[in-house]
Image (cartoon, coloured by chain):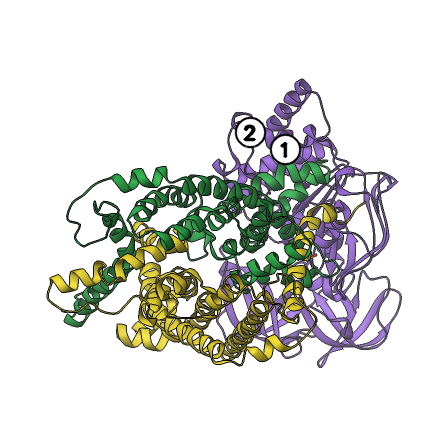
Chain colours: A purple, B yellow, C green
Amino acid sequence: MLTEISAIAPQDTGEDTAVQIDGVSKSFSGTVALEPIRLKVRRGEFLTLLGPSGCGKTTLLNLIAGFLEADEGELFIDHDLVTQVPPHQRKIGIVFQNYALFPHMSVAQNVAYGLRTRRVPKAETAERVREALALVKLEDFADRRPRQLSGGQQQRVALARALVIRPRVLLLDEPFSALDRNLRSAMQVELREIQSRLGLTTVFVTHDQSEALSMSDRIAVMSRGRIRQIGTPSQIYDRPENHFVSTFVGDANLFAATLLEKTDATASLDIGTTRLSLATFQEELPEPGPVTLFVRPEQCSLTDPDQPGAIAATVALSVYQGSYAELHLDCSVAENGRVMLRVPASEAMEPGTDVGIALPERGPAIYTTTERET
Amino acid sequence: MSKRPFLGWFASPSILIAFGIAASFLAIVQFSLRAHIPGALDPGGFTLDNFTTLWKTVYGKAFVTTVLLCWWTALFTLLIGYPLAYAMVRAKSARLRSAILLISLTPLFLGEIVRTYSWMIVLGNRGFLNATLMQLGVIDRPLDLMFTMTGVVIALVHFTLPIVVVMLAAALSHIDRNLERAATSLGAGRIRCFLTVTLPLSIPGIVTATSTAFAWTFSAFATPQMIGGGKVQTISTLVYQVGFASFNFPLAASLSLVGLLFTIAVLALFNTGIHRLERIGAH
Amino acid sequence: MRKSVLDHLLDWSGRIVLISILGFVLLPFVVVAIASLNDGAILSFPPKSWSLRWYANAFEYRDFGAGLVNSLRIAAVGATIALIAGAGFAYVFNRYDFMFKGLLNTVLMSPLIIPNFTIGLGLLILSTAASLPRSIWLVIAVHVVIVLPFVVRSVYVSLKNFERRYEQAAESLGGTPLHVLLTITLPLLLPGLISGALFAAILSFNEFTASLYVVNQRTQTLPVAMYNYVREYADPTLAALSVIYVAPVAAMLLLVHKFFRLEKVLNVD
Ligand SMILES: Nc1ncnc2c1ncn2[C@@H]1O[C@H](COP(=O)(O)OP(=O)(O)OP(=O)(O)O)[C@@H](O)[C@H]1O
Ligand SMILES: [Mg+2]
């Protein structure tokens, strides 16, 4: 569950841009939903917009699809300026969370809709509908009504309907959030397979970080109407650029620290009474002063409390998780008083045990404390 | 691109109708300020006489009668409509619920004339009710039901019942059943549970229903006209009489206008009542 | 769980109250049905002899036939106009902001508060002032004004529950606004449109008070013809007609109920 980073390695997609968003912003009656956004989606890439509820993911998707009009900025699809182009001329495929299959049409009619609007000849329409349904393995369901299908099947019809028009970009807004866990992972694999087979430029919206990490070529992490970081899943997970990204993606332990001195390679800081010297991946460190030190649970290890450089803590709770146990430690220098790390289930400890936390010499990140936000 | 497709096409028919409504309202206002020339259909010059005429006893009495009718009708309709709505919302089978709803709605859909005529046959001196009661020996002289307030109220209750039931049922069906279950689990009996939970929560619905019953009764015409038979004069019957018996349309217009203002004032009163109730409910 | 004596008492008194109220609602219609079979020209209970002659009389009486034709025409045309205007207004009211939107809404909904006799009087004065003839179109205009709010409400409720995603999906698939309107929006709104139109037709068919102000001998509706009959004759013809009248209205109502479930339409589910 932790770092199951996609087996499909980020492909070399070249630098050809399929969607270019140039300073597009959106407010709803005074409240800003989206600050000016700059974003390039490469051709054939699977880009995920990840962020908490209300951060503006759907708004951004609706702007790309043309359902909303940008307050400012320009939008290009395949290098065509489309800012003023209505949705029906954008040639975009879209899949919604609740599928939005037309209830008064059969599966085949649903899939054929986008071809009928383009006046594709009958014979060709039939052929392409068949192909699209075959692609999502639903050939035998052509004559059913949407309500006679299961959630996963409806989802696949929605996908076929969006794909059959050979869209320039495929947009998906939390398409799997209504599905149960097993079906969701099956659909994730299926979507990713189809997408890479067709080389389809895809913008995918989710607030599920493990879904984002496992599926994407690149992830854009959003909060409060801004993109906070764009990068490959491993860049996002291993090298979060700011406090928000570090806590939103994956589990994080945060320590209140004081940065004493920084050089090119290392930083020396005080955490409580412990003095440490660390190497981080960051290109730029904050100014000396109060900072937040960020460490992933798997980067921490347990040692003797008396070990030099160890941070003192007490086991508060041990949560059994099957193959491992989560140890929740009371720690006075942690920002929220707690530190979490994972140990093999056999090494779980009784509450009350005093332990030491050893931090790695390479890997942690240092952020300015003021940058915290939800 | 057009950001509001069809706006013009879709709005224009209704705008046309709105102009018609506004114009007819202005026509009434205008006529209410014109002098009546006996024998002529066209009105005379501008005057305030119509409104001073309204101070005469006939019109004052009609106002009082109308308000009394509204009050009694609203009261009895509530008393009858509440149990009906309650039974409907709480009916265990969908069949029973549909049956109660359909029966409650019949008066609404059978129209004023059929309904009022039927009541005339029931209430008349030799009508069903008096004939039955006399044959049973309960009374030996027919009850005076036709041409009386009592008769008119009975028929008006029947008239307003459907809309009141629908409004009360809507309010009752939106009360969370778990609140009643909670009250019962805390030891409240059925009667106490009803009096302390269900009834207070349905008060906004009761107020809305009452105001609607009031407005409907106020505008009722066929019932007071046919069952009242000229003995029970309301504003609606008087407007018709002034208009079509003495062709004094300016006076009819001013009477309508005052009636309308009165209705709006009463409904506004109810409205503030509802808002106040909602504000209390919010705490 | 055992019920106490009080519970049984409550259950039974509840049933009795319910049945007596339903009896009160249905009583006049039962009585009128009995009266329609009374052989004599003067009503008496119970009827001394029975016959169907008042039914024959109801069918033969000219004004009723003419009134029925008028009423059906007025209801059909009026409901259609109200449907077009009302659905259009509900659509723009639901979707767009525009100048005087609130004012337009207030004016169109005002017939819910304005008594029907005032509406009838107003349009009568207006048409006289504009020297328009008292044609059937005047009656239709009055009916449109009166039933319009009900159509608007019915369609507006459907629109509010309408999933905009359907339209967006259709648009993304290349549908122009008109195409989307015709292939997605209208078909999906059809139940709301039909029930709105049916309600409008029933209300229009029953409308009496406002019609009384604007009809003449030629354009009188069935309810007005019936009213005029009661004023002149006391025989049970009208009782027979009432029974006949019940049939089509009940059929329409059952139809609405069968397709749309009244509980849903009236929001009491
Ligand atoms: N039509 C609208 N009118 C007013 N405010 C809106 C509208 N649509 C979105 N917003 C606001 O804009 C912000 C961003 O909304 P958006 O739907 O894009 O969030 P989201 O990231 O998709 O969230 P979620 O994960 O819950 O779907 C929210 O604060 C929302 O309240
Ligand atoms: Mg969203």
**Residue A371 visible to the viewer:** yes
| Label 2 to label 1: alpha-carbon separation | 9 Å
Q: Are marks 2 and 1 in contact (CB under 8 Å)?
A: yes
Q: Which mark is residue A138?
A: 2
Mark earlier in primary sequence (2, 1) = 2
Q: Is A277 positioned to the left or the right of B152 in the image? A: right
- Image coordinates of residue A155 in percent, x first then y, are 58, 39
Depth check, front residue: A283 or A205: A205
The quarter of the displayed image where residue B6 is located: top right
The quarter of the displayed image where residue B23 is located: bottom right
Q: Which mark is residue B9?
A: none
**Residue at the limit of the structure toward the front, as seen here:** B39
- Image coordinates of residue B271 in percent, x first then y, are 53, 74
Amino acid identity at mark 1: Ala
**Residue A95 visible to the viewer:** no
Q: Is A13 positioned to the left or the right of A58 in the image? A: right
Q: Quadrant of the C terminus of chain A?
A: bottom right
Q: Chain of mark 2?
A: A
Look at the numbered disc 1 and give the secondary structure of its residue.
helix
Depth check, front residue: B246 or A203: B246
Q: Which mark is residue A160?
A: 1
Q: Chain of mark 1?
A: A
What residue is rendered at 60% in x and 77% in y? B51
Look at the numbered disc 2 and give the secondary structure of its residue.
loop
**Residue at the limit of the structure toward the left, as seen here:** B137
Badge 2 and badge 1 both on one subunit: yes
| Vertical side of A85 occupied by B109: above or below | below
| Vertical side of A75 occupied by A359: above or below | below
Confirm if mark 2 falls within 8 A of ligand 2: no
